[in-house]
Image (cartoon, grey):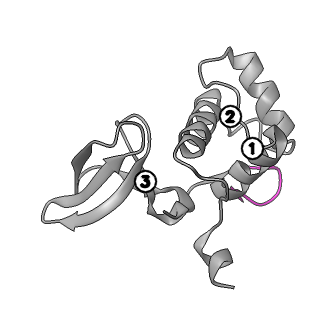
Amino acid sequence: MELKEILAISGQPGLYKYVAQSTNGVIVESLLDGKRMNASASSKVSALTEISIFTEGDDLPLADVFTNIYNHTGGKEAISHKEAPEKLKAAFAEVLPDYDRDRVHVSDMKKVFMWYNILLGAGFTEFKLPETEEK
């Protein structure tokens, strides 16, 4: 399973693995409980490789943010996304010191930490972008 196969679906909790194309959208499998569902063509579906975080310089791909978290925690689970906003901001600043404090909201931090923990639970230990893997 590669990071490019992992999808976030607007309005749906958690992350999903791409399974197949269907006539009305895509069939996905939840990384949390393994249940399959159809994500309709009208749903906003984003691959994690397409998402990036605003920084003071160039935007940083989500894969690199996950790698920073993995290195910072030593491969262990990150802070819970249910922690207080102040704790989330402090933890996010530790793993990404130059994040754009005006454009990255606490809700974004919650998603990053929640998604990281889901991926870690699904067995991910490397977070590479497809371009990096091909070189």
Residue 11 lies left or right of residue 42; in this view the side is right
- Label number found at residue 7: 3
User: Is 57 drawn above or below residue 102 in the view shown?
Assistant: below
Q: Nearer the viewer, residue 46 or 135?
A: 135
Amino acid type of the residue that numbered disc 2 sits on in the rendered structure: Glu
Residue 28 on the magenta segment: no
Identity of the residue drawn at 65% across and 65% down: 128
Mark 2 lies on a secondary structure that is loop
For mark 1, give the secondary structure.
Answer: loop
Return the x and y of residue 15 as percentages of the image width and height: 44, 44
**Residue located beneath label 2 in the image:** 77
Within-10-Å neighbours for mark 3: few <14, some 14–19, many 20+: many
In magenta, the rendered stretch is 55-60
Q: Amino acid at mark 3?
A: Leu
The residue lying at 40 percent from left, 34 percent from top is 13
Rendered-image quadrant of the C terminus: bottom right
Marking on residue 75: 1
- Residue 133 placed where, x, y %? 64, 77
Q: Nearer the viewer, residue 90 or 17?
A: 17
- Name the side, left or right, on which 23 lies relative to 20: left
Q: Main secondary structure of the magenta part?
A: loop
Other residues around mark 2 within 10 Å, as few (<14) / some (14–19) / many (≥20): some
